[in-house]
Image: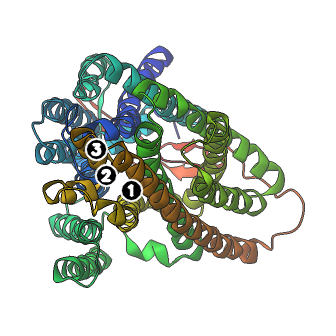
Amino acid sequence: MTAPPTLPKSRQRSILAVLMVCSLLIWLDNTVLSITLETLADPVQGLGASPAELQWATGAYTLIFATLMLTAGALGDSFGHRNVLAVGLVVFAGASIGAAYAGDAGQLIAARAAMGVGAALIMPANFAILLWTFTGPGRATAIAISSTSTGVGMAAGPVLAGVLLDHFWWGSVFLVNVPIVVLALAGIVLLVPNFRSAAVRPLNPAGMLLSIGGLAALTYGLIRAGQVGAWSRPDVWAPLAAGLVLLAAFVLVEARTREPSFDPRMLAQRMFGAGNASMALLFFCVAAVTFYNAFYMQGALGYSPMKAGLANVPTALGAVVGAPLGARLVARWSLRPVAVPALTVAAFSFGAVGFLELDTPLVWIEILLLAQGLSVGMVMAPVTGALISSLSLERSGAGSAVTNTARQVGSVIGIAVGGTIMSIAYRSAIEPSLNEVPEAYRDSAGISAEQARHVAATLDRPTLAQAADHAFIHAMHVGAVWIMVIALFAAAVLVIALSAVGKKTGEKKGPAPQPDHEEDCGPEPRSTIIGQGTFDRTARYRRSPVVGDQ
């Protein structure tokens, strides 16, 4: 059997560079926004967005990203992954311009949702092109190199946002996406073939609508609870119930579909199902902590955007160091004795946010952020590899989609629940301080600490600003306790997942045997390169057992 034709090495490296720029765009935008939240909440320099509106500005992007990503892979099979990637980049750039010039919070939310559409088209196509471009041992190396764009985006995003916000208006953090998209599009047109699969997957509009509707209703109910401060109102429990019903219908529809975009039957495997549940809970906690941290540094502590951006760098550095460190430790001791303690440490680091005060020295904050990034990085990389490796090769693509979707859903719910806890706790703490505030300003000051500080400046009441700061710190402490409990539960779920592996493999003490990183994985599917003829891809190839996700 002959080996499949391959692209020249120089072109492979150039394509990898283009794909890394595309991936960097997504991660850069995520981290840039976290530094911008405080400015967007400012009634003068920003949009005066409420906590609920900021939750939607963050969550709308992740919500659309999570649900459309399942369909985007099928679109790539039908129309070619290069075409889908290019369309995703154009959509992302156009939505970024819309976000930059949004006149109110509603327009910003709509633009962020459109950016989620672009991101959903970019990510699966980006990874598919990488898999088609590289074969054999070079594929594992390419995946590892490509994943470094995540760390670069996490580290550079906050600093870039700080520089832009210190010198320009808040919309500049979105406009910076445009030149990156232009650069990526030029590389795609000149270098990337239009790979697509000969076996086209059917689209699933019913599943897509049910998943979007279910998550949107559930998110709305959670955020609405924070706005009204009660769970018993019909406008809270009704959308929550509707969301659960729609998501249950989504699972049933997917289970009965011959080729589902999200296969719920895969979750019945203890390792894969419980492992993904644990990682979704971890992403829940990370999203909530990140949401709190944005308002703590710039709002309560009064850091400038630049200082806040630099202060967040240890989190990214910790994640970059933690991922390879976790992999090395797993190679020596096996997964369970590394991942479970690391996730437990992450849980306690989230809970340690409850000890942060208005006068906490910056060095202690930096140490805490470094511990969070390091412990989370040590969990995510090896567990991701174990989840994908627990599946057969034929199911690895579908498994990657399930894994990515579970994590994005965890992030959406984490922002909604974390913000709601903060809103309810803040409102309870600030209430006694509002008795002497004129009634016309009372509701505004009760919405958020940012609004209360603006009211305090308008009325020249510094005591109200101080009360708002203390109320926010109280709310952050309450949220930190809940986040820690959820992260500890995630660790317990991970123990259950990994115990299934131990029972199947007869896990023994000492170093576990490691899989061959060039194991024979069987035949690769046929594919067509549009515009460059058809070639046979049925030759056997060798790939790393860890596929990973971007």
- The kind of residue tagged 1 is Gln
The spot of residue 296 in percent (x, y) is 46, 45
Dot placed on the residue nearer the N-terminal end, 2 or 1: 2
- Relative to 305, say whether 235 is above or below: below
- Asked if the residue at tag 1 contacts the one at tag 2, i.e. Cβ–Cβ closer than 8 Å, the answer is yes
Along the line of sight, the residue nearer the viewer: 506 or 455: 455
The spot of residue 434 in percent (x, y) is 29, 60
- Res 415 → quadrant: bottom left
Q: Nearer the viewer, mark 1 or mark 3?
A: 3
Along the line of sight, the residue nearer the viewer: 288 or 150: 288
Q: Nearer the viewer, mark 3 or mark 2?
A: 3
- Relative to 345, say whether 132 is above or below: above
The span from disc 1 to disc 3 (Cα, nearest Å) is 38 Å
Residue drawn where x is 56% and y is 36% of the image: 316
Along the line of sight, the residue nearer the viewer: 89 or 422: 422
- The kind of residue tagged 3 is Ala
Residue drawn where x is 43% and y is 18% of the image: 14
User: SS of the residue at dot 1?
Assistant: helix
Judging by the rendered image, the residue that carries numbered circle 3 is: 456
Judging by the rendered image, the residue that carries numbered circle 1 is: 408
Along the line of sight, the residue nearer the viewer: 17 or 209: 209
- The kind of residue tagged 2 is Thr
- Asked if the residue at tag 2 contacts the one at tag 3, i.e. Cβ–Cβ closer than 8 Å, the answer is no
Relative to 230, is 389 on the left or the right?
Answer: right
- Relative to 285, say whether 485 is above or below: below
The span from disc 3 to disc 2 (Cα, nearest Å) is 34 Å
Task: Name the mark on residue 62.
Answer: 2
The span from disc 2 to disc 1 (Cα, nearest Å) is 6 Å
User: SS of the residue at dot 2?
Assistant: helix
Question: For the residue carrying disc 3, how many other residues have a C-alpha within 10 Å: few (<14), some (14-19), or many (20+)?
Answer: many
User: SS of the residue at dot 3?
Assistant: helix
Dot placed on the residue nearer the N-terminal end, 1 or 3: 1
